[in-house]
Amino acid sequence: MKNYFKEEKPIINHNMKKLVSYVFLFISIVVQAQKIDTTLVKLESALQKAETDSLKVEALIKLAEYQKKRDYNKVIVYCNQIHEILDLANYDTRLQRAKAYGNSGIYKRRKSDYSGALKDYYAAKKIYIKINDTVQLSTIYHNIAFVYRIKKEHQKSIRLFKKAIAINLANKRYKNLANNYSMMSACYKNSKQIDSSFYVLDKAIHYFELSDYEEGKQQAIANKASLYSIQKEYDKALHIYLEYLKYTRLINKKRSIIKTLSNIANIYLRTNDYDKALIYANDSIEMAISEDSKQYLLNAYKIRSKIYKAMKKYDLAFNDIEKYNKIDKEINSIKKTRELKALEILNEYEKKQLKDSLIKARERKLLSIQIKNQKLQSKLYSIIMVIVITVLLLIIYFSYKRLKKDQVTSEITTVNENNISSFDTKGISTEKPQELSDKELQQSVQLVINQLKNDQEIEEEKINLFKKNIKKLNNKYLKRLKTKHPELTKTDVEICSLIKVGLSRSEIAHVRNTSLEAVKSTKFRLKKKLGLTKDDSLNNYLLKL
């Protein structure tokens, strides 16, 4: 028996080795197969099989759309190929060209080429308006608003987001609507209108849920973390950011991972946990370098320099500041170069377009002039009469409006002639205004309140002066309010002062340039802070205080 088993042992070992090798081979094949992006393979296959220019362009547009969230460096390659094909095409290329402009605009925006992005977006917008494609137009409004948000032109950005919201709401495009609200929240945040920012983020989350878009919903929730951070509720902010980091890693959304790592590092810095802050900042820098994302790398170096400074490692902090300055100069240099190049290309393109349009216009004119000449002569006099009457009516209408506006302005000027700085077409004079008496303050405030009650247009400068006059008029009252309720924020106190002078919700929304819903939400939170019950009247309480 012993001899038998000694002879069989080598055979068993050999078979086991073969089995193990087959298993490893199978696993390696499965892993390799999983690495293949089947969607990308299908899209590239469709491009190879495309027989016409139109089909080739459609395939390239789909590839650009697909790569926006994966390898956006390839997007501009596809867009350039699209324009090369369309330049030689003999069919209506407007829609396809507009889509290419939209995609190249996104690429340039991500590369911090904001002027280039705006040129492409406005080119797309012009086409969509001509072909009356409101659905695509809403997306372009959103993208233009996003660029203005980055450029910190928040009021312009909010106006464009609202245009996109109106179109998407009419078309019930809930996912796009949610994106509009989510992006607009940052404009309110940067304008220090935190209540409005919370309100529009809740709207965004609601519409993301309706559209069953989890990625957008998670992004909107993550945006709330930045608001909690502003309010110094760091525990809430950190919890949201850590959960969002898990989610972005799960879906491999690289730019969001970089940004979230920096945000977490910043929270740990503010809570004096420097070791953890440094870990997340290093991860953010490493990933930003690998992804060649200079804007995110700039932010990460800035945060890490602050961490080193807090840790009293001044050499390392100074080193990061030098890197920050170097990258900042590179970005600005690249921007200027791109702007000059873009202007040169645009100039050449416009010359070509002008030349082609003149030739075509001349040909069309020669073909149609004989047919239209008699019709134009018969209609010419009637058209001129309509134009003259319309112009006269417009002159009368605007003259009346100007007269009415001047009357209101003269009343305010009379009350404040000794203290309000004069305005000219170039700006505001530097003369220091005299102090108003209580009676004059009351008169000035009452005039603006009357304008609000009559739903008249009020200039921004007058609104700002109105707010200042209310503060002066209610100075003792506001001191009592802050003494009794020290937990009230600056926004809370301003709302209280506006209620005190008898403004309604809509009038408060007008003065603060926000929505009715945001004012309602703020008044609801105010009642809680003031310890009022549901049945108690906030207005009565503030008037009696």
Image (cartoon, rainbow, N blue to C red):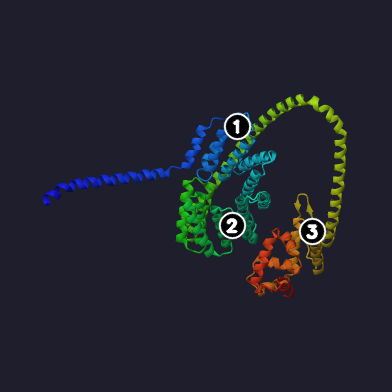
- Relative to 51, is 251 above or below? below
Could you tell whether 377 is left or right of 233 in the image? right
Mark 3, residue position: 455
**Residue located 31% across and 46% down the image:** 23
Q: Is residue 419 above or below residue 145?
A: below
Question: Dot 2, how many residues are within 10 Å of its Cα: few (below 14), some (14-19), or many (20+)?
Answer: many
- Per the image, the residue denoted by label 2 is 205
Circle number at residue 86: 1
The reply to whether dot 3 and dot 2 touch (C-beta < 8 Å) is no
* Three-letter amino acid code of the residue under disc 3: Asp
Q: Is residue 402 left or right of residue 244?
A: right
Q: Earlier in the sequence, mark 3 or mark 2?
A: 2
- Tell me which label, 2 or 1, sits earlier in the chain: 1
243 vs 86, left or right, is left
Using the numbered discs, state the Cα–Cα distance from disc 3 to disc 1 in whole angstroms: 51 Å
Q: Circle 3: is it few (<14), some (14-19), or many (20+) Cα within 10 Å?
A: few
